Amino acid sequence: QQLHALHLLKLPRRVFTDKFCNGHSGCRKLDTMAIARTLSVLAVVAAAVSGKKTELGLSCGASGACDEFEVELAEEELAAEMQVELLQRMPVDIRLAASGAAAKVASHVAALEGASSKACSVDHLVGSWKVENALGIDGVVVTLQVAPRSSSDCESVTGNIHYLGKETEYTISAVPKSDGKLHVKYLNDKAEPVYFHEGEFDIGKDVLMEDLGAMNGAKQNDNMLLHFTRAI
């Protein structure tokens, strides 16, 4: 009700019409019916807001035709008073007090909804990724650029990984797991012999992992994980 009242205070108040004043043309006066309509709206709003008697201080003279400037000024003053009362009376919305937490939850939900709307599993992986201080080595940065699909085929996408001045092209595929993650396969079919690493993508956290210590499905070394985050 209070928000509606604030909206009503913004109604157009220029409801003037040209009239003759004591037989002289060109005197701009406010129509008597327009005054009644305007004052009715303001009176209803004022009563609904505060229950107090609120008057529009006007002196229209014996003719009942008020000067435009006088009416506008009086209405502005009344509207200002009523807006102050509205703001003072408006209760604090406890939901706004938790807006920070709400924003975080909304952001997380939006990320999950966006993730679930992907046409193919591999679409989650598209973008620029990086790992700083890779494998625990200070200053070593590994980047991975995954290109969008070039066709409607959902089988794979192409990724280029850069490390220590070298570059390797992967054919990357992904299949859903039961825990909200994707199982990811990084295939290097240009190497001799061909090999692949495995990893996973956490949809909720938007984190991509590659296990360099596992090759062709066999675990060879521990602590060889690359945890990619999106490059900004």
Image (cartoon, rainbow, N blue to C red):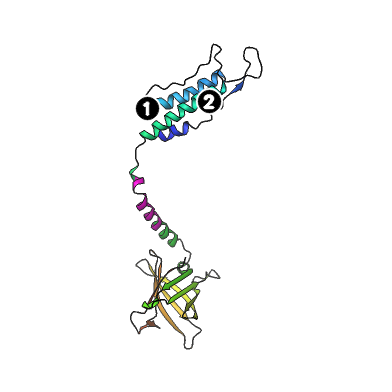
Q: Are marks 1 and 2 in contact (CB under 8 Å)?
A: no
Q: Residue at x 51, y 25 (%)?
A: 73
Relative placement, left or right, of 115 versus 15 is left
Which element carries disc 2, helix, strand or loop?
helix
Q: Position of residue 162 (x, y in %)?
A: 48, 77
- Residue 99, image x and y in percent? 37, 49
- Mark 1 or mark 2: which comes first in sequence? 1
Residue 69 visible in the displayed image: yes
Per the picture, the main secondary structure of the magenta-coloured stretch is helix
Q: Secondary structure at mark 1?
A: helix
**Which residue position is annotated with label 1?**
50
Q: Residue at x 47, y 25 (%)?
A: 41
- Residue at image position (44%, 75%) is 141
Rendering coords of residue 219 (x, y %): 35, 83
Which corner quadrant holds the N terminus?
top left
Classify mark 2: residues with Cα within 10 Å, few (<14), some (14-19) or many (20+): few
Q: Which residue is mark 2?
A: 72
Label 1 crowd bin: few (<14), some (14–19), many (20+), radius 10 Å? few
- Residue 198 x, y percent position in the rendering: 40, 77
In-image side of 50 versus 21 (left or right): left
The answer to whether one can see residue 155 in this image is no
Q: Quadrant of residue 52?
A: top left
Q: Is residue 195 above or below residue 34?
A: below
Residue type, label 2: Glu
Magenta stretch in the rendered image: 95-108
Check residue 61 for magenta coloring: no
Q: Nearer the viewer, mark 1 or mark 2?
A: 2
For the point 46% across and 34% down, the residue is 7
Q: Is 101 a magenta residue?
A: yes
> Is residue 218 positioned above or below 208 on the image?
below
Q: Amino acid at mark 1?
A: Ser
